[in-house]
Image: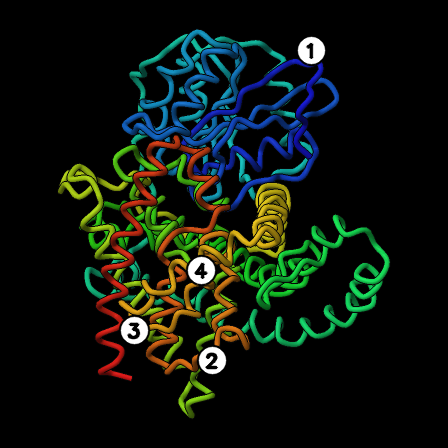
Amino acid sequence: MISSAIGQQRQAVLIVGKESVGKTTLASALAGVSADDANFRGSTVAVEGYVSEDVVYWDTPGIFRQSDTETTKLALAALDEHEKVLLIIQATQIDEDLAELLPLVAGKQGAVVVSFWDKVQPGEAAMEALEKFSAEVGVPFLAVDGRRLNDVGTHRITDMLQAASVFSASRLKYRAGWRIEPRPGILEHRTWGPLLAIVLLVLPALATIFGANELANVLHPIVEGWLEPLIATIEATWPAWLRLLLTNKSDGLGYGLLDMGPFLLVWAMPTVVLFSLILGAYKASGLVERMNIALHPWVRYVGLSGRDVVRILMGFGCNVPAVISTRACSGCSRNTAIAGIAFGAACSYQLPATWAVLSAAAIRSGGSPLTLCFGYLFYLGLTTLIYLRLASSPSGRDALNILMTPRRPFTQWPTAKALWREAYSTLRQFFVQAMPIFVGICVLASLLANWGILDFASRGLGPVMASFGLPADAALPVVLASIRKDGILLLASDHGEMAPMTPAQTLTAVYLAGVLLPCLVTALTIARETDWRCTLLLLGRQALFAIAFTLFLAWAAGWIL
């Protein structure tokens, strides 16, 4: 566990290094607690304390000295506040890491841990190199394999820190002279590599369609059956103000907390878990870094770095941790990554609602649900790329926008422990960060619906729907989707089908409801991570692009479908 209240009597040790060198794993091992990282490059986005009996190990985000990421700023600020440091470097690029990081820790007390030692050819020459580094730097060096760190290794690190040696050199004359990289594979192929990376990125969305939603279809009636007696009791005997908060329904959509519960736990959670497991496998295997490198030459044209794409993909599970994770993005691409999440990352609320509505429309017309679902995904992806290309800053698209990751990383089979840690971490973020906001929004939506404000807004927007070739009844789902994305479900309800829509109209309505504005949860998170001015500009720009794209879709879908 991570402690928020740390006693003054404990000694503080700051753990620093580049991204994905094993800082979080080492901090948790030294403190004897479970790691709480999100398992993708740059996943640690805050300085977090791991508490043992007498020491607080402060885990920091990865440092990129050549970047302006918020996470690098946090790590450098933490270095100014701490005197005892545990520096983590990679054995595979030991000369480069020491040259970049030693100037940051010069004059402080501590030790050096050399990770990825299993990649170095064992022998006297390798150990002699560590001894020479130690003699010149003035602090002990310990080589470890972070994935197999045992009690003996943690005790040796603890003893080194107690020795209170001082980093006496910021520049080294000695160099080990090696840099170890794996052989290139298909992901390094100039043409096939980016194509394979795109397939791997699309895989989580496909898995959601055929996996999480099928499970939700089975669980939803079961959970509803469990809740029906409780809801009936509340409706019959509880005070009106509690009924308003717990079981309130308006125009066919429930806003009460008990109405939200089944959808949140049955539809959203399987999607979040599935995405977390897939991303965990990508990270634990080292595959995600290779995907980043493969995609970078292509996504640079829309103002992104290859490493930003995985963060946008993370938004398909939950937008909240995805937006927070952009702290590790470069300053020239962070706003673009946030815009991509807000516009194109259909979260675990939106995806199930979208598939349900599109599938119902296709089946009703005698067509294939897959046609509408894949058509939606294709158009969403295409318009997201166009939007980012036109909205991104020129500096993000510049040819000098290099990828801020190490060179080609090693790949390995992911372990069950790593996959569980990823699932646990993501679920914890889902419940601790996203759930409270969802609850607050449900309360607000219940009050607005009870006061007639939502109905008034939908009636006022009804004539606007005609410009998109949609019936007036489509206005309410569009309004509700700006608060909670499962408002899209109204397009498949009795209310939404008072004027039956064709598959083309349904596709148009679902797209408009999904991208016109991010849900209130995402908007509040963006405002918290940036500021209200930037958030309002982003919302206005997104709405304008969404209207333009929807007008084109309304015309094109009528011809194609």
Pointer 2: what residue? Answer: 359
Which residue sits at x=38%, y=38%?
92
Give the amino acid type for the residue marked by disc 1 in the picture.
Gln
Q: Quadrant of residue 178?
A: top left
Visible residue check, residue 413: no
- Residue 161 or 284: which is nearer the viewer? 284
The quarter of the rendered structure image containing the C terminus is: bottom left
Which residue sits at x=48%, y=43%?
118
Measured from the top left, where is residue 478 in percent x and y?
42, 61
Pointer 4: what residue? Answer: 458
Q: What separation in Å lies between label 1 and label 4 (alpha carbons)?
A: 56 Å
Q: Quadrant of residue 469?
A: bottom left
- Residue 298 or 344: which is nearer the viewer? 344
Disc 4 or 2, which lies upstream in sequence? 2
Q: What separation in Å lies between label 2 and label 3 (alpha carbons)?
A: 20 Å
Pointer 3: what residue? Answer: 469
- Labels 1, 2: front one: 2
Q: What separation in Å lies between label 4 and label 3 (alpha carbons)?
A: 16 Å
Pointer 1: what residue? Answer: 8
Marks 1/4 in contact by CB < 8 Å: the verdict is: no
Give the amino acid type for the residue marked by disc 4 in the picture.
Ser
